[in-house]
Amino acid sequence: MDVSVYEAKTHLSRLIGDVEAGLDVTITRHGKPVARLVPIVDDADPRAAAVDRLRALKRELGVQATPDEIRSWIDDGKKL
């Protein structure tokens, strides 16, 4: 997701929430990328990181799925 410096400044808390959910946020100035916010992934629990990324994707796409459905997709290896 790309956001301007102004939007990043104005909506930092929301963007941090998006990053915590697994999204990468690119901050732009005059349309050019200048910084990136990325989640810190806990390599000790890759399944939790996958669930977080799927939740972020779910929110971005507006997909209505329960956490149990998301877990079953991971278990089944289903691709979105």
Image (cartoon, rainbow, N blue to C red):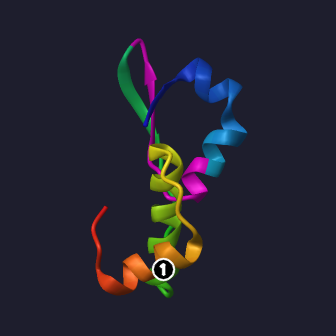
Q: In percent of the image, x 44 and y 48: which residue is there? A: 24
Residues in magenta, as a range: 18-30
**What x and y, as percent, mark residue 51?**
50, 72
Q: Name, please, the residue furthest toward the top.
A: 30
| Residue lying at 55% horizontally and 22% vertically, measured from the top left | 5
- Under tag 1, what secondary structure? helix
Task: State the quadrant of the C terminus.
Answer: bottom left
Residue 62, percent from left and from top: 50, 45
In the rendered picture of this protein, how many numbered marks are placed on residues? 1
Q: Is residue 30 visible?
A: yes
Instruction: Please tell me whether residue 69 is drawn above or below residue 9 in the rendered image.
Output: below
In the rendered view, would you say 73 is above or below 33? below
Splitting the image into 4 quarters, where does residue 28 fall?
top left
Left or right: where 39 falls relative to 1: right
How dense is the environment of label 1, judged by Cα within 10 Å: few (below 14), some, or many (20 and up)? some
User: Mark 1 sits on what residue?
Assistant: 71
Toward the viewer: 32 or 75? 75
In the image, what residue occupies the spot 60% across and 58% down? Answer: 20
Q: Along the horizontal axis of the image, is 5 left or right of 72?
A: right
Q: Indicate the amino acid at tag 1.
A: Arg
* Residue at the image point whose x is 44% and y is 45% from the top: 61
32 vs 76: above or below = above
Is residue 42 in view from this perspective? no
Horizontal side, residue 44 vs residue 79: left or right? right
Across and down, in percent, residue 4 comes to 51, 21
Q: Where is the N terminus found, in terms of image quarters? A: top left
Quarter residue 10 falls in: top right
